[in-house]
Image (cartoon, rainbow, N blue to C red):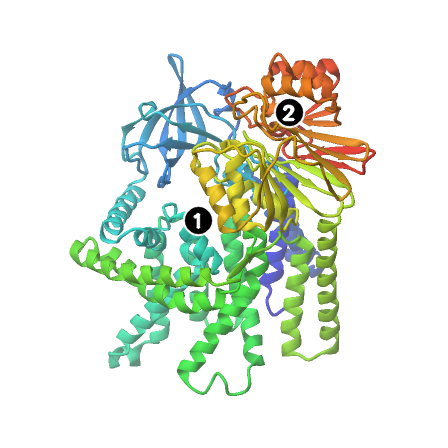
């Protein structure tokens, strides 16, 4: 077999995926794995190749299942903190086990808890928590032994289809719980340097480098250099990250195989140049081999300076594998080398398979190895051999195009954006960042212990290079059609795309009829699947409504029978540190293949309904915006109106005088607020929308409270609805029983956040629903709530049905 490790890698990945989705206990996967390995050993001893092959396949799959199960196994309950979680604050003590992640508004600490203080007794425990510390003047370091008073909770997700599994992400890092400390007096450092001597020394060195970068370069150039050298990109402004994303060069901000490969290439080049100056060395040693061996030291040094993060370790293993392959004369079998590197990484860290940086790195390298020769074969004979400079340029373009083709589906799947500037931006920026900024920055880091002045001078020199790069990317991002948003591709579509790409390569190398037929059928299937998905998204045939899980806030998507869409509110958190529109609402819309919104409705300008709409207005075509006309002094509202003006989105003020509209056969009526009358506060002035489709009615009530409920009871005779979106996230007023009785819903949907401080939905509301026989559905425990009706029967479902 030409590449024997590729099928083994496929089997191991299959085992990891199986174990991930089936969550097989270790008590089952361990003995099964040992049994298959024993069978493999006995088959080899007896020389039975058929049985040996079968047991080899089963062993590799079983080991994959066992490995991922080991990564997902939490601490035993009798030793963990979980038995002490009862909603009250705990005093915990533990060691900061990694370099703190510093955000503009908080510092995240990964703490290995060693004991908790329960009253007057100390209880020894073993657990790992993510502790978020609010703004404070204190600086935390690896190895600090801290004491903190916090309320620990199990991490939870925004449970929407296609949403990010934050809980599983933390579990892969061994984190079972998380907590926050908002009062600086609730956390103290008892003692320092409790970690390993080596890691503590490394972190002190990294701190000096961090200080050097921040002091010697201006903002935001220093933040980008910090990401390149130390692997810390938390401080990069959001608009700059968006610029890098829009131009298809965001990979440069995260240390990956590209960075380590550049360092390896430059080191080999420099070491080889030095060795060539000695005739003795040229005659006595193979300088290529010596150069490759010596290059491993700077690569490992870069990994250390970058903090030994898992992504950096993965990149180091991959590049070192390629160096070893060249040293032992296996450079013609680089696909096998890539498979070996992937197996080594997944054996140590199987959770890496689900890390987007791992997937992008290995798919990019695989695409370069497979697709680049095919692209070069398409060039006219002699094109890439005229001159050495032209040869290198054309090869660079082919490599970049190959990586772009290989990673495009993954980028669309995870980031929902495709850049048309990828090749141009990479051609312009990688020579600057990769071959000037990165190596000189690392030289500065190495020089720091010897000469702080020389190190500072180098940082000062590279800072303008970063500024030039940012300016180039901002210009490219501002060009028309520099990038565009795309819906989340299906797994079947991605499979067909990669199949078509592979068959195209085979067809270029070998003009066989069966390759041509297979390629044509694959492309036809891909086009057919795309057409089906488009038709399904634009012609649902039913009225569908989803109350999106946005935490303590509200956002509801309505899809009408012939594809028109209405988004009512966009959720949002106070403080503005987490963009619900970017991270929750938009991913759900892309997952549902929503490419544009016909009507955006802002029920009232409060943060938990408004903030998420800003990102939606910026990144989705919106035909018009409805609101009650009430204004706000908040930053989010200014952004909201600014985007409307910038993108020339019509703004319609709606109230009870607004004529009812008919969208795809559904009647849309505004039944509150009145154009004039009682003076309502912001909540009671909410826009209330009633949507009727044949015999089914939905009443979406915003944040109205008792005053507005009383007004609706007195002035509206047509409140009856099949489904009611609970007023004010499940609040309860003296008028609420009469209001719900007038609406007479079969189902009440409550959009609220888990552990919210308001106690929504109120116990009184829950008791009332039980008494009246009304089914209540909650986003905090059930995730996104979906309703679908043909106008006669309404069906509902939730993302977390077991809750």
- Does the CB distance between marks 2 and 1 fall below 8 Å? no
Q: Give coordinates of residue 705: x percent, y percent.
A: 59, 20
Q: Give coordinates of residue 199: x percent, y percent.
A: 32, 43
Q: In the rendered view, would you say 607 is above or below 678?
A: below
The Cα–Cα distance between marks 2 and 1, rounded to whole angstroms, is: 45 Å
Q: Residues within 10 Å of mark 1 (few under 14, many from 20)?
A: some
Quadrant where the image shows the C terminus: top right
Q: Give coordinates of residue 742: x percent, y percent.
A: 73, 18
Name, please, the residue furthest toward the right: 792
Which residue: 51% across, 43% down?
614
Quadrant where the image shows the N terminus: bottom right
Is 727 displayed left or right of 575 in the figure? right
In the figure, residue 7 lies in which quadrant? bottom right
Residue 65 shows in the view: no
How many numbered marks are there?
2
Is 52 displayed left or right of 584 in the figure? right
Q: Residues within 10 Å of mark 2 (few under 14, many from 20)?
A: many
Q: Helix, strand or loop at disc 2?
A: loop
Q: Nearer the viewer, mark 2 or mark 1?
A: 2
Name, please, the residue furthest toward the front: 676
Is 599 displayed left or right of 396 in the figure? right
Reading the image, the residue beneath label 2 is: 726
Q: Give coordinates of residue 503: x percent, y percent.
A: 67, 70
Residue 469 shows in the view: yes
Which residue: 63% across, 78% down?
509
In the figure, residue 675 lies in which quadrant? top right
Q: Helix, strand or loop at disc 1?
A: helix
Of residues 5 and 172, the one drawn nearer to the viewer in this rendering: 172
Of residues 722 and 259, the one drawn nearer to the viewer in this rendering: 722
Reading the image, the residue beneath label 1 is: 310
Of residues 494 and 608, the one drawn nearer to the viewer in this rendering: 608
Which residue: 53% across, 62% down?
481
């Amino acid at each position: 077999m030409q590449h024997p490790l590729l099928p083994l890698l496929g089997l191991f990945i299959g085992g990891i995926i199986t174990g991930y989705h089936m969550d097989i206990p270790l008590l089952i996967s361990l003995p099964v794995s040992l049994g298959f390995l024993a069978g493999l050993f006995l088959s080899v001893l007896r020389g039975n190749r058929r049985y040996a092959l079968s047991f080899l396949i089963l062993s590799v799959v079983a080991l994959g299942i066992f490995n991922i199960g080991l990564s997902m196994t939490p601490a035993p309950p009798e030793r963990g903190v979980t038995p002490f979680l009862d909603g009250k604050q705990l005093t915990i003590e533990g060691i900061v086990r990694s370099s703190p992640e510093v955000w503009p508004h908080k510092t995240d600490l990964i703490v290995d808890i060693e004991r908790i203080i329960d009253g007057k007794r100390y209880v020894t425990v073993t657990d790992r928590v993510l502790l978020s510390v609010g703004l404070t003047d204190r600086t935390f370091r690896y190895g600090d032994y801290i004491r903190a008073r916090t309320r620990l909770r199990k991490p939870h997700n925004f449970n929407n289809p296609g949403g990010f599994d934050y809980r599983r992400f933390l579990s892969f890092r061994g984190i079972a719980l998380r907590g926050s400390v908002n009062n600086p007096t609730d956390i103290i450092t008892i003692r320092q340097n409790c970690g390993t001597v080596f890691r503590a020394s490394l972190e002190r060195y990294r701190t000096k480098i961090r200080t050097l970068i921040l002091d010697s370069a201006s903002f935001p150039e220093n933040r980008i250099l910090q990401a390149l050298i130390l692997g810390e990109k938390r401080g990069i402004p959001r608009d700059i990250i968006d610029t890098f994303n829009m131009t298809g060069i965001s990979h440069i901000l995260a240390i990956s195989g590209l960075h380590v490969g550049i360092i390896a290439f430059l080191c080999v080049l420099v070491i080889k140049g030095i060795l060539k100056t000695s005739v003795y060395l040229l005659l006595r040693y193979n300088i290529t081999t010596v150069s490759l061996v010596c290059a491993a030291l700077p690569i490992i040094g870069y990994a250390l300076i970058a903090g030994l993060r898992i992504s950096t370790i993965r990149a180091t293993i991959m590049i070192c594998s390629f160096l070893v392959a060249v040293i032992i004369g296996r450079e013609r079998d680089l696909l096998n080398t890539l498979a070996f590197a992937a197996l080594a990484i997944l054996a140590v860290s199987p959770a890496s398979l689900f890390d987007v940086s791992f997937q992008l790195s290995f798919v990019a390298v695989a695409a370069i190895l497979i697709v680049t020769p095919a692209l070069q074969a398409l060039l006219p004979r002699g094109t890439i051999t005229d001159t050495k400079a032209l040869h290198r340029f054309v090869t660079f373009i082919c490599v970049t195009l190959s990586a772009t083709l290989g990673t495009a589906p993954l980028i669309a799947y995870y980031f929902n954006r495709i850049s048309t500037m990828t090749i141009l931006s990479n051609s312009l920026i990688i020579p600057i960042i990769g071959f000037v900024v990165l190596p000189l920055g690392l030289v500065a880091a190495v020089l720091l212990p010897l000469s702080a002045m020389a190190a500072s001078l180098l940082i000062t020199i590279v800072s303008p290079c970063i500024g030039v790069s940012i300016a180039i990317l901002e210009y490219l991002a501002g060009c028309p059609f520099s990038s565009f948003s795309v819906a989340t591709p299906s797994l079947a579509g991605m499979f067909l795309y990669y199949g078509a790409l592979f068959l195209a390569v085979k067809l270029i190398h070998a003009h066989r009829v069966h390759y041509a037929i297979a390629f044509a059928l694959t492309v036809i299937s891909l086009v057919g699947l795309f057409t089906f998905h488009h038709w399904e998204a634009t012609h649902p045939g039913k009225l569908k409504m989803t109350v999106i899980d946005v935490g303590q806030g509200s956002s509801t998507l309505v899809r009408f029978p012939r594809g028109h869409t209405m988004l009512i509110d966009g959720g949002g958190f106070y403080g503005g540190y987490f963009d619900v529109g970017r991270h929750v609402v938009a991913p759900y819309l892309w997952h549902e293949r929503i490419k544009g919104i016909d009507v955006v409705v802002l029920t009232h300008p409060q943060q938990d309904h408004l903030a998420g709409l800003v990102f939606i207005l910026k990144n989705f075509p919106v035909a018009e915006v409805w609101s009650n006309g009430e204004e706000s002094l908040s930053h989010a509202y200014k952004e909201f109106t600014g985007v409307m003006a910038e993108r020339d989105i019509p703004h319609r003020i709606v109230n009870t005088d607004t004529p009812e509209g008919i969208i795809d056969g559904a009647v849309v009526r505004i039944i509150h607020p009145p154009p004039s009358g009682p003076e309502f506060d912001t909540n009671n002035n909410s826009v209330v929308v009633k949507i009727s489709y044949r015999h089914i009615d939905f009443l979406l009530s915003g944040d109205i409270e008792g005053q507005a409920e009383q007004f609706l009871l007195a002035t509206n005779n047509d409140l009856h609805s099949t489904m009611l979106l609970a007023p004010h996230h499940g609040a309860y007023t003296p008028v609420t029983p009469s209001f719900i009785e007038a609406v007479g819903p079969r189902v009440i949907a409550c959009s609220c956040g888990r552990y919210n401080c308001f106690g929504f939905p109120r116990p009184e509301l829950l008791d009332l629903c039980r008494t009246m026989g009304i089914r209540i559905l909650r986003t905090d425990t059930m995730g996104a709530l979906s309703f679908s009706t043909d106008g006669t029967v309404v069906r509902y479902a939730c993302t977390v049905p077991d809750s």
